Amino acid sequence: MRIEKDSVGYLEIPQDSYYGVHTQRAVNNFNITGHRLDRDFIISLAEVKKAVAQANSELNVLSKEKAEAIVQAADEVIDGKLHEAILVDPIQGGAGTSSNMNINEVLANRAIELLGGEKGDYKLINPNDDVNRGQSTNDIYPTAGKLTMLKKVPKLMAQLDALSQTFLQKAVEFQDIMKLGRTQLQDAVPITLGQEFHAYYSVIKRGMHRLSIAKTEIEAINIGGTAIGTGISAHPELSQTALQKLREITGENLVISDDLVDATQNVESFVVLSDSLKAIAVSLSKVANDIRLLSSGPKTGIGEIKIPARQNGSSIMPGKINPVIPEVMNQCAFLVMGNNVTIGLAAEHGQLELNAFEPVIFYKLIESFEALTNGIQTFNENCVKGIEADRERCQENLERSTYMATPLAEKIGYEQAADIAKESVASGKTVKEVAKIFNISDDILNDLKVTIK
């Protein structure tokens, strides 16, 4: 063991550990979720530290030797190494200070090794004075959070695009299949199955557009603002210098926020991002509901489409197959909607110059991204791609419905057409058959048609 000291006192740390006293205290204090920081978040923290070390060196506030060692250590973390030394729970008090200090200590100790020293010899590289130079948790942590979300967006976009294309293909495949449209779960008027599936394509594309707009909200970062946005302890040129380095490292179209005090106080950009995820989740859940309804049966439901059988549906009812993939899509959507509430509450509860609740915002945003990305993939691959139309069932349901009462009302008036529709339901006869009993002329009946655009 080695002994490390902080403002609270002394603490024993395993001799070979890359983390230090601040990390160990966080581990002791915050055993909340049982998880560690997301991989993309760890990489994002390292990218920020690398950019600032390069900027500080260029601005002559950090020696070249120290900067190069810190940058090399950060590159190792970016490449996926040393992640096992990032121990802190994603949900933590302190507005993310534990996460910031965890990466500071890991990079410091690895840089010390690279300079030929022993872990814990902070005279060579200090986690606060060198790795965290010109920085605060309050600009580093939200910047890393935004970089993390920028890594998540393309993964989700790819799955959304794949799903939208599947719906478009199905729309073409089903374009000539006439069926009954329904409003409020009651028989309405004809539509094609292709039109229904094209609507699913359209709502997914609209969600993608909203997400692309929300993405621009998180491209503005507050690096260089330090504690409350005033830039105290940072070089006056750190913001712009680090920005250019970070743009080169990440390839993202980052900008410095116009008002760093505002950017440090307010985190509503994450609410906007979460709102876009919620909107996507709402749409996907509605689509999943439709697919469950349209495939219901197989004998006594709507049954106009068939979805792939993925597993046994019951431990007691032989041969029963359940719509398990749409159901899991529903549940992913529920999770995202609930997370959106949490994110909104956390954003609203910031006070004065800082929001202390970014840890739970990032934790829930990451969870929402993962649930949507993975849920959409399984929805597409294990369900939507294998959907088949039951043409006979579509035709049967159409013929058994009262849809012809709508064009009939244009000829004879709503009230009499309603009487005919009511009798059709009661007797089981078609609308045309009942209309003849009501002495509606053959000319009128032969002229009935429903136009499908």
Image (cartoon, grey):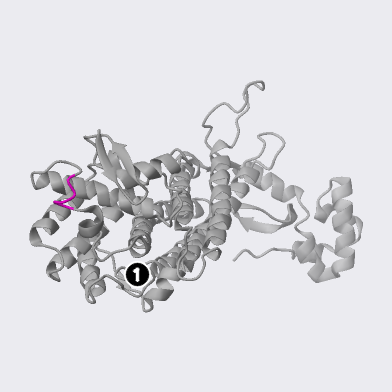
Q: Amino acid at mark 1?
A: Asn
> Which corner quadrant holds the N terminus?
top left
Residue 355 in the image: state x and y as whole percent.
47, 64
All told, the count of numbered labels is: 1
Viewer-proximal residue among 246 and 405: 246
Viewer-proximal residue among 228 and 309: 228
Q: Which residues are magenta?
A: 121-125
Q: 94 above or below 388?
A: below
Furthest residue to the front? 9
Q: Secondary structure at mark 1?
A: loop
Q: Is residue 133 left or right of residue 391?
A: left
Residue at horizontal 48 percent and vertical 40 percent from the top: 386
Residue at horizontal 54 percent and vertical 53 percent from the top: 339
Q: Is residue 194 left or right of residue 353?
A: right
Q: Is residue 172 left or right of residue 12?
A: right
Q: Is residue 345 left or right of residue 255?
A: right
Residue 32 visible in rendering: yes
Mark 1 Cα-neighbour bin, 10 Å: few <14, some 14–19, many ≥20 = many
Residue 389 visible in rendering: no
Residue 238 in the image: state x and y as whole percent.
23, 72
What secondary structure is the magenta-colored segment mainly? loop
Furthest residue to the bottom? 258
Magenta span contains residue 306: no
Residue 326 in the image: state x and y as whole percent.
56, 42
Residue at horizontal 16 percent and vertical 55 percent from the top: 71
According to the picture, the residue beneath numbered tag 1 turns out to be: 222
Residue at horizontal 63 percent and vertical 58 percent from the top: 191
**In the picture, residue 328 is in which quadrant?**
top right
> Which corner quadrant holds the C terminus?
bottom right
Residue 70 in the image: state x and y as whole percent.
17, 54
